[in-house]
Amino acid sequence: MTAEGIPVEPAKQPAQQPAQPISPLGTHEAPDGEWLRVHPASPFIRGWVVLAAIGFFFGRDLFERMLQGRPVLEDGFTGRVPWLVAGGGTVLLIAVLGFILTWYFTKYQVSEGYVRVNTGFVFRQQRQARLDRVQAIDIVQPLLARIFGLAELKFEVADAGESAVRLAYLRTDVARQLRATILARASGVVQAAGRPQEAVPEAPEYPVLSVPPSRLIGSLLLSEQSFFVVLGGVASVVLSAVTENRSFYFYLIPAVLGLGASYWGSFNKGYNFTAAISPDGIRLRYGLLDTQAQTLPPGRIQALKVVQPPLWRMFGWYRIQVNVAGYGAGGNNGEAASRTTLLPVGKLVDVMSMLSLVLPDPGTPEPGRIFAAGLNGLDSDGGFVTTPRRGRLLAPLGWRSNGFAATDTALLLRSGRWWRQLVMVPHQRTQSIAMHQGPLARRFRLVDLVLHTTAGPVQPRLIQAGLDEARALFDEQSARARLARKRQTSEQWLAQLDPHQVERLKETIPSITPVQEGQQDG
């Protein structure tokens, strides 16, 4: 096969050819650059709603007759049932034919440097992603796809507002093998000479943590929305008692329905959450009905946020969210929010484990002390620089917690007294810096400093810093960002790491977390 994917007649070999590896859709590994088709059941899984709608519309009268005990067909084949059956059969045949054509014209190609997907038989479309720009590859399995043993691959590419390529559907083992091969190429792994088409085995993984269902349920019951719904319920009861008007109770109905839907969505997305580390990145798996498997290369994470709502403080729970190029804001819908969640709920030991994976080089000889101060400290704990005392009037509760600290590899921003928050931005991920100052802040010589990274749920912002300290940080962080970007220029993140990096990351987890548990218990 040529580089353009055109088959050519192979030359006859005098010796017997060796057996070829397993291919994604057949019995042999396809040569590099050949166009392949997805699983034949793919259009039916995507379009099952259409089939169900056709059956309901044209078969409703037939089902009603059967339930009522009436004859399905009247004498002489009169009535509208035969016409409905004929019309439904025709529409169903057209839909199935459309599904077959959709499958036939849907092809994908994994070539040197690119993955491409062609779709459509009336309006043709081709989407492609550069392998060295792949930020992450997710394996998604809706409930119906899981029943048939199929999975979808979603490729996230830098500078893309949405998924650059969606490949649906492949057999689950094929999807995992294809993801391993593409991640190996994207991360700089070179296949053995003389065997360029050999399938790359899936990289081994080391389990890091898992979230018990009981903790997930408790976090939902003690979440922010529960707090506001309880306040709304108390307000409705008080107003109903004062005004002797029970109509206020009706306002609770949409709130309860919305809260139930939110609870179910969060539980469905966060159920069976597990995290593991492998040479190709941090692997996240979660989901009850619709399962999803993500692989996030640590070097692709642009910013990280650790949050502790007030009601979680009694149990010592935290949540971690990240910005990843290509994922977008991540807060507009449940799917996007789950994909930007690195830890839905966990204890301090879990937080330290994830931080050691995202930032294996913390840039300080005492990472445990500075991270603990960022999560639970006040004033100058851990070397943080906080809001000056003159800012007490503008932030009477948070002026002792709002602050920053810088290590050799990242900038840490701490904020919030009730809703605690710690933001970490690696120096090389800082795109630009801005200072904002309103009229009141100008009067007290305070300023907010904003770090710009890729879009996501994390918005790095230093709140109400002293003017002199903010100016100094502005210059120092700009210099640190320039220097860090010069040190890391390759898109292939694995090529920059030591081969034994994973083992060292695994060893750092027990060495850091027991100290933090002792600090928290004390």
Image (cartoon, grey):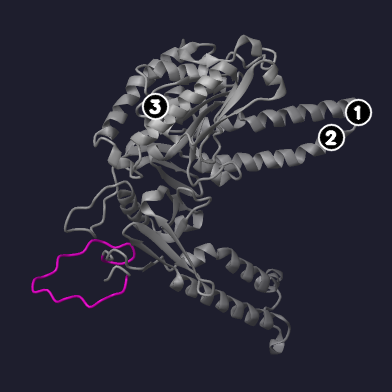
Residue pointed to by mark 3: 409
Q: Secondary structure at mark 1?
A: helix
Give the residues drawn in magenta, as a range: 5-28
Q: Residue at x 67, y 15 (%)?
A: 444
Give amino acid for label 1: Thr
Q: Residue 274 or 369: which is nearer the viewer?
A: 369
Residue pointed to by mark 1: 243
Label 2 vs label 3, nearer the camera = 3
Q: Residue at x 42, y 23 (%)?
A: 349
Tell me the crowding category of disc 2: few under 14, some 14 to 19, or many 20 or more residues within 10 angstroms, Cα based: some
Q: Earlier in the sequence, mark 1 or mark 2?
A: 1
Q: Earlier in the sequence, mark 2 or mark 3?
A: 2
Q: Secondary structure at mark 3?
A: loop
Query: To which quarter of the image does residue 29 belong?
Result: bottom left
Residue pointed to by mark 2: 248
| Residue 435 inside the magenta-drawn segment | no
As drawn, 83 above or below 361: below
